[in-house]
Image: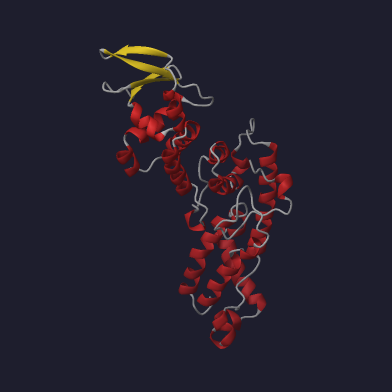
Amino acid sequence: MFWYSDGSVVLSVADTLFKLHRSRLASQSTYLQDLFDGAPDEDYDADGQTSPLYVVRVKGLKLFDFSSLLSIVEDPFNNRRNEPDFALSAAIARAAKLLGFDQALSWAVEQLEKMWSNKITDVESGPLEPAQEALELSRIVDIPSIRKRAFYELMRMPSFGQSEAISSLSVADYKVLTYAREKMAQHWSDVINKSPTGRAECCIKNPSKCSIKKDNAMTRNYRWWAVVHRENLLQHHLLDPLGGYLRLKILLPLEAAKDPAVWCSHCCEEGLDRRSGRPLERPRRVVGASVIEMPFIITHTRPETLLPIN
C-alpha cells in the first residue's frame, strides 16, 4: 500500500501499517501533528531500521478512506489532474475531516460541489447517483452546498431511490421529500397548463408581427397541448420539473424555427422565463441550505418542522 523504505514514521490504521514521511504528514494534518508530539505506541523494526509506530485511534476512520486520502497527499499533482469519482472524493473528504487535512478537504469539497452542482445548466436528464450517499456525506463532513442537489435527485427517483423492502431515509427526510414532490408536481402542472400568450415586450408593442398574438385563446391552447401530448411533457416531467424546463428550453426554440408562422420565438423565450419559476425564490426558504441557482426552488413555509438542517 503506502510503505516507503525511507519513511520516518509508521502508522497503524485499522490493523494496517503504513510507513510514511512524518514531516509531510505533520505539516498538513492537525491531528497527526498533535499525535507526533506525544510518545509513540512502540518502536517498529523494518527495512533495517527502527521507526516510531503510532496507532491512529479515530472513531469512524475507515481503511479505504485513509488510503484514498494518502493518494492525494502523497501524489497531489498527478491525482489532481484526474477527475475523481464520487467514491474517491467522498472518502478523501471523510478522512480529511476526521484528521484535520484542511487542504485535502478543500480540494475534495470542490470536486463534490462540481459533481453535485446547484446550477440548472448542470442538471442532467436522469437522476444523479448516488444521491443518498451524497446527502449523508453533506451532514457527516458538513458540506451543505451539495445537500440541495442531493435532495432534488432523490425527489425525482422512483420511491426516492429506496427499495421496497428497506428504506434508509430518516422520517424527517421522507417528510421533506414527500412535501417537495407534491409542490413540484403541482408547480409543473401549473407551468404546463399555460400556453405561450404573446406577452413578450416586442410583441406587445407590435402585436401584428406576433404569430401567437394573432391566434385566439382556443387556437393557442390547442397548438400548445398538441406539443405537450406529442412530447409527453406533463407525465414525463411531473416529478422532475427541472428536466422539464431544460426540455422546454430546447423544444420551444425548435418549434419556433420550424414553424415561425405558428410559434413566435420572442414569446417562446418569454415563456421560458415565466416557466423558470423565479417567483418561487421569494420565500427564500429552501431544503437544507440557502437559496441556490435553480429556477425551481423547493420551498417550505415551516422549515423548522420539516427541514433537516443537520
Q: Left or right of 61: which side holds 197? A: right
Q: Left or right of 304: which side holds 237? A: left
Residue 264 in picture, x, y percent from top left: 53, 77
Q: Is residue 178 above or below residue 20?
A: below
Answer yes or no: is residue 177 visible.
Answer: yes
Assign the C terminus to one quadrant of the image.
Answer: top right
Q: Is residue 45 above or below residue 275?
A: above
Residue drawn at (43%, 33%), measured in percent from left and top? 29
In the image, 10 versus 257, the foreground residue is 10
Residue 27 in picture, x, y percent from top left: 38, 34
Residue drawn at (39%, 17%), measured in percent from left and top? 53
Assign the N terminus to one quadrant of the image.
Answer: top left
Residue 167 in picture, x, y percent from top left: 64, 33
Residue 103 in picture, x, y percent from top left: 42, 40
Residue drawn at (62%, 54%), measured in percent from left and top? 238
Picture quarter containing residue 191?
A: bottom right
In the image, 48 versus 157, the foreground residue is 48
Picture quarter containing residue 278?
A: bottom right
